[in-house]
Amino acid sequence: MRILVTGAGGVVGAALTSLLQSKGYNVKALGSRRDCNLENFEDTLREFIVYGPTHVFHLAGAVYGLGGNLKFPADIFRRNLLINTHVIEASRLLQVEKIVAMGTIAMYPAQVSMPFKEDDVLNGPVHESERFYAAAKRAMLEMLESYKAQYGTNYAFALSTNLYGPSDRFDEFYGHVVPSLIRKFHRAASNKGIVEVWGDGSAERDFLYSEDAAAALLILMEKGTGVFNLATGVSTKIKFLVETLHKLYPAAEYCWDTSKPLGQVERSYDVSRIRRLGFEPQFLLENGLRRTVDWYSDNLKHLRSY
């Protein structure tokens, strides 16, 4: 096996690359645009030809968070569409044996019964706050299905919940909820400031630690075919997340900004399909947050500023 990992510099890509290397796999990690510009097909195909992967974990994407979804809809749609198209087509041309691709639970319809079940992922319009990011990811799933029908492409597709951990994008404006809050709490604790948290804390999310996500993706490569919810199966209120971070940063204060959007209020997932493959999360939210906070504090001087 010659494994190519796109998005290897991200929160899950870093954990997956580390896991694969620890197991002795031959791994090529594409961490950023400096390694390969996946938005350019010639660059992408050249990378595939030089390395010659037999298996591909496609985790790369242009992610902007809730604030970025509202501000950069065209960039989100165009960039993700290009990246996904180029990786899948290059995989076909190089006759890759299997692709494990990272989707998102934002692909689920806004009006669908909870918990989310994989068969419902395309059955209706998505939540407006994530419309264009979700549309690009839906297009990737449909592309994989079309390639399976015409070319016999073997794939597994992970509908990823909120992921967090070391090597995340700690951007308080355009990052996901956990890394953006960690950055805000760290700064507030250092300056004795106040963290303004969007919403009122009532929204619920399923948070999965990066090492657990990496283990699940490897299981999908080994055993999975089709679409799988990648989540813990446990929903947590944003209020509990904020309270837990406050315990890790007791010098910081926080308040709720109810003028800001909540996003989708409730999200819960049926994880029976991936559990049947043998996946069981190992990290409670409190433990994962502590490890992430410790990593952020240790690596802060090496992280770029936003």
Image: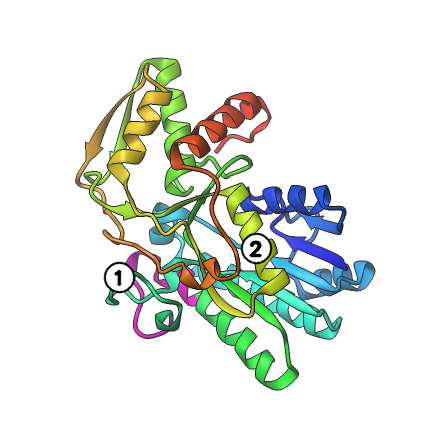
Name the residue type under label 2.
Leu
Q: Residues within 10 Å of mark 2 (few under 14, many from 20)?
A: many
Q: Who's the residue at 17% across and 39% down the image?
A: 258
| Residue 214, image x, y percentages | 57, 48
| Residue 111, image x, y percentages | 23, 67
In the shown orientation, is residue 88 left or right of residue 294?
A: right
In the shown orientation, is residue 45 left or right of residue 159?
A: right
Image quadrant occupied by the N terminus: bottom right
Q: Quadrant of residue 303?
A: top right
Q: Who's the residue at 51% across and 38% down the image?
A: 168
How many marks overall? 2
Is residue 59 visible to us here? no
Residue 114: mark in rendering:
1
Is residue 47 visible to us here? yes
Residue 217: mark in rendering:
2
From which residue to which does the magenta span run? 122-135
In this rendering, the answer to whether 90 lies above or below 21 is below
Who comes first in sequence, dot 2 or dot 1?
1
Q: Residues within 10 Å of mark 1 (few under 14, many from 20)?
A: few
Q: Who's the residue at 65% across and 82% down the image?
A: 151
| Alpha-carbon span between mark 2 and mark 1 | 24 Å
Q: Secondary structure at mark 1?
A: loop
| Residue 230, image x, y percentages | 45, 56
**For the residues bearing labels 2 and 1, Cβ distance under 8 angstroms:** no
Name the residue type under label 1.
Met
In this rendering, the answer to whether 61 lies above or below 199 is below
Q: Is residue 134 magenta?
A: yes
Residue 53: mark in rendering:
none
